[in-house]
Image (cartoon, coloured by chain):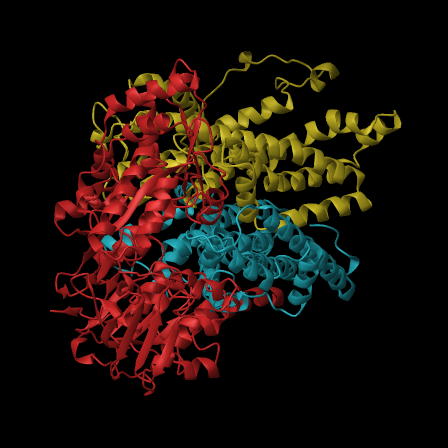
Amino acid sequence: MIKYLTRRLLFMILSLLLIITATFFFMRLAPGNPFTSEKQLPPEIEANLNEHYGLNDPWYVQYGDYLLRIVQWDFGPSFKYKSQTVNDLINEGFPVSLVLGLEAIFIALAVGVTLGIIAALKHNKWQDYLAMIIAVFGISVPSFIMAAFLQYIFAIKLGWFPVARWGTFSQSVLPAIALAAGPTAFIARLTRSSMLEVLSNDYIKTARAKGLGELVITVKHTIRNAILPVVSYMGPLSAGVVTGSFVIEKIFGIPGLGAHFVKSIGNRDYTVIMGVTVFYSIILLVSVLLVDILYGLIDPRIKLAGGKKGE
Amino acid sequence: MQQISKDKFTVVGNSKVEAEKITKPSLSFWKDVFMRFKKNKLAISGLVILIILIIMAIIGPYLTSYNYYQNDLMKANQPPSSEHYFGTDDLGRDMFARIWYGAKISLFIGIAAALIDLAIGVIWGGISGYKGGRTDEVMMRIADVLYGIPYLLLVILLMVVLGQGLATMILAMSITGWINMARIVRGQVLSLKNQEYILASRTLGAGLTRIMGKHLIPNAMGPILVTLTLTVPTAIFTEAFLSYLGLGLTPPLASWGTMANDGIAAMTYYPWRLFFPAMFICLTIFAFNVIGDGIRDALDPRQRK
Amino acid sequence: MKKKMLVLLSLVLALSAFLAACGGKSGDDKEKVSQNLRLNLSTEPFSLNPGLANDSASGNVLRQTFDGLTRIGKDGEPENAIAEKIEVSDDQKTYTFKLRDAKWTNGDAVTAEDFVYAWKWALDPKNESQYAYQLYYIKGAEAANTGKGKLDDVGVKAVDDKTLEVTLANPTPYFTQLTAFYTYLPVNHKIAEANPNWYKDAGDDYVSNGPFKMTEWKHSEKIVLEKNDTYWDKDTVKLESVEFSMINDPNTTLSMFDNDELDRAGAPFDTVPTDSMKALKDKGTLQTQAIAGTYWYKFNTEVEPLNNVNIRKALTYAIDRQSIVDQITQGGQIPAMAAVPPSMFSENEKGYFKDNDVAAAKEALAKGLKELGLKDASELPTITLSYNTDEAHAKIAQAVQDMWKKNLGINVKLGNEEWAVYIDKLHSGDYQVGRMGWLGDFNDAINFLELYRDKKGGNNDTNWENAEFKKLLVDSQTETDATKRQQMLKDAEAILMDELPIAPIYFYTDSWVQKDNLKGIVISGLGDAQLKWAYFE
């Protein structure tokens, strides 16, 4: 196990390094610089600013500088917002996005798995068709349309929830649902097909032959085995929730990290872009690692200590 | 119990030849798959929808006298009528013509991106899976790293460096999209490469290209086809997403994504501007999804009822 | 079974974690207390240090929390604020401000030294203030800011605690308007010297002297202001508190207004979505006010065929501005056939040429084609029209593209980038026709005309320059007779409108909706808002 962990961590660091390098160079290639404004800066001031932020140094100096600071968990100042550093932005924005994301993941898992189980158990009956049609529509509707739609019906027309902003539970309901819609649908389908596969296995027939009740079979055998693909999906799921959050946070006025990220790209705020990219990458790589470990713990057929290769 | 008289039966005998005869007409693998596919009502409905959409994309613009870019500021924001079947948008352009023009664009983006993903993914995953060992490890790690860069960032940068447009968008989507296909192909190749016919082929001196092209890929075609069909809706979805963030195509080019984006702002006042593009996006994604599912189900003999 | 429990347990933990996080947060106050104003600021302010602020979001907050020497009053004219008396020398270059008794929120008295400190701080190149150039009207300011002179030589002096003496580089008739601008606001020098980070967050060190004090600042989320009891004019202030949220999406903010989560939506704090304008106008709730700003297309006069003045004329005359204003922007804007807004030159409501003058456009086109040696418009190279990514700019550009094709047969391609990239391209000349707008910093025509004085001026971008135009502007700086000066500026504008390095489209308006019982928000001719006199009936 330890050996496996060490190897994975090593690869993670390598990936991270490559990601940082790639992002660094891409940002340099893109036109526009953080100090462009409508009223053009006098060249002396611009020179000063460039000097201050080290933008005049040769690229390898800037690169080395940056790596050094990342190791110390210092992502630098924001070019665009004088009063804040990137760390500030992350510290403020991430908890918000995290809560939203966890809510969405929870909804996606709870509702998705349930729908999938029902669909599988009532295979080819109307419950199956209904659940699957709901699921396919969940995947088919882009999240921002879903969000606008939910906002219109439940907040504006019916007034059940506030239109926007963040802070109370009721303000988080609509955004979480909008964010969860796609993943829920996907998980439902995944669970269903996984369940169907498990149900066709011999050991289920054996269990029935033994006389076990349907409920016991379902819970003790079927679900437990069928849940495995869902668990391994949780890696890409967190990635999806993260990207989905950009749009959701914009529509619902949620001060999360996703909103900052999108704005920083438009602002050419280099440090924020790189900082948030690195941060998200770390989060995602760690989630995938955790999921793989979890998967290894749950499924006795996988032997991690043997050095599970690849995915 | 009905009485059946004995003389309705004759003894055929049990000749060996007869016993070995296969009575079911022989089906190729694909005919078998197609038959199962046909039975799937949902999948067929998806196919029908898709065919209708494609036909309309071709003939739609001819069904109306308006074209997709002509402004008529005085007739802006009109609801659907006999003159403008889907209404007009905020610059007075006919929505019906625009929807079918956008259909061409959106479908083109989706299919082109999927095909590029296919090409890169098959080659990458195929080589990685077949070679195994170090090559495999390295190639997969590279894939992982690319996957780790936030997709949006990469797309934005590409849009900015190469300029916004159709080609850039397809390129941008293909750049990270192939990884999934590569993984699938690699998985398939890994499980197929130790089959005996591959071994036989190698013994006979077949090179990498021949083994890949003639044996591995055709046999992996099933999951490849499924992934392909499911990549198209992702591409269409992504295009809509990018358009929402303002990174979409520039006017007067229009795609369903850009139209949906325009429509959201007007949702409460001129709902038809959102309704039509959104509906068609959903229908198309729906169609491709059920078709993909249908193929997947049809390929899997265990799913047979 | 144990492993299944593990998964279940972690799910439960996650659930309780978010419930705890959410449940613990205090809910937004939805009960309506009578004098609490809820507004939306549309974006996080760049900086709430008056010396660093360079954007309207920051300005919108600073105008409520600080008081300068003057403040733009309800009639659009500067009125005395911290300055009790203003004396101007005969050569109009020396201003002596006598300060009234005013206090900072921490009890310190507002002194002349506070102004000196603040202005010199902004001019100090190491503070990297992007708006320091607003102070260049003061003698020695530009030199100090560009490192060519010393800060000590800047023409501002604290004669005593209550007397501030300012020496200008040239006579500047609009100087008392400038002193109301946020770069000229004072800063409590005792606090700022002790804590150079005083402005980064709300707190004990965020000391101000205006109608409101900032009590809370949650970055990118909200800013809360409360009535300032140490304000010298506190009896005029009726509002108890102001809460700014920071939501970027205009559709969302309008919905919030409809849902009674905001008391006002629209300019200048944020924007009203264009698609809703018609419906709001029909309902009768949309309010508009003309402001001093012009929306125009800039021509890169060094690129073919835009280097030919007749081609530029053709393009400019062929635009149907009234349709754009009626159907697209729908905010009661005025079609612009001049550069300077009507609030400064009232004749500019009519302008220098006719709107949608297709005949004159075709004539100019024919002349231009002949000069270029071409027979037909289709032989012209495709022109690219660029704008920064925005719904309204996109629509206007599409309409103009169509007009140029329909009326002149000229093919136009559209291009757009986000703001930072776009403005960069403009400044570096990497464009052909580009959309831009200019909002006046103060109520004088030179603010608009001087943009095009120097070919390489920071905000010119057109690469156009005209010696006579330049001379008129430079001479107007030293002209002390107000009427003569106005005429010089008018003459200059005439030249600009004849050579047309820009095609003006419309004059801006602010549009908004607000609660019926909300009164007293003063929007100046420049389009900025003040809450000092606001109240709920």
Q: In what quadrant of the picture does the C terminus of chain C appear?
A: bottom left
Lateral position of residue C159 relative to residue A84, left or right? left
Q: Nearer the viewer, residue C455 or C300?
A: C455
Q: Nearer the viewer, residue B177 or B89?
A: B89
Answer with the quarter of the image where residue A167 lies. Answer: bottom left
Lateral position of residue C517 relative to residue B67, left or right? left
Q: Specify the farthest residue to the bottom.
A: C107
The residue under the point 30% across, 29% down is: B95
Lateral position of residue B194 relative to residue C99, left or right? right
Q: Is residue C508 above or below residue B212?
A: below
- Shown in cyan, the chain is A
The residue under the point 45% across, 46% down is: C423
Q: Whole-percent x and y of residue B208?
A: 80, 29
Q: Nearer the viewer, residue B291 or C357?
A: C357
Q: Whole-percent x and y of residue C528?
A: 26, 60
Q: Is residue B158 above or below residue A19?
A: above
Q: In what quadrant of the picture does the N terminus of chain C appear?
A: bottom right
Q: Whole-percent x and y of residue C14?
A: 50, 67
Q: Colour of chain C?
A: red
Q: Is residue A15 above or below residue C28?
A: above
Q: Nearer the viewer, residue B239 or B20?
A: B239
Q: Whole-percent x and y of residue A148?
A: 34, 49
- Shown in yellow, the chain is B
Answer with the quarter of the image where residue C55 lies. Answer: bottom left
Would residue A220 be seen by someone viewing this image from the given angle? no
Would residue C155 be seen by someone viewing this image from the given angle? yes
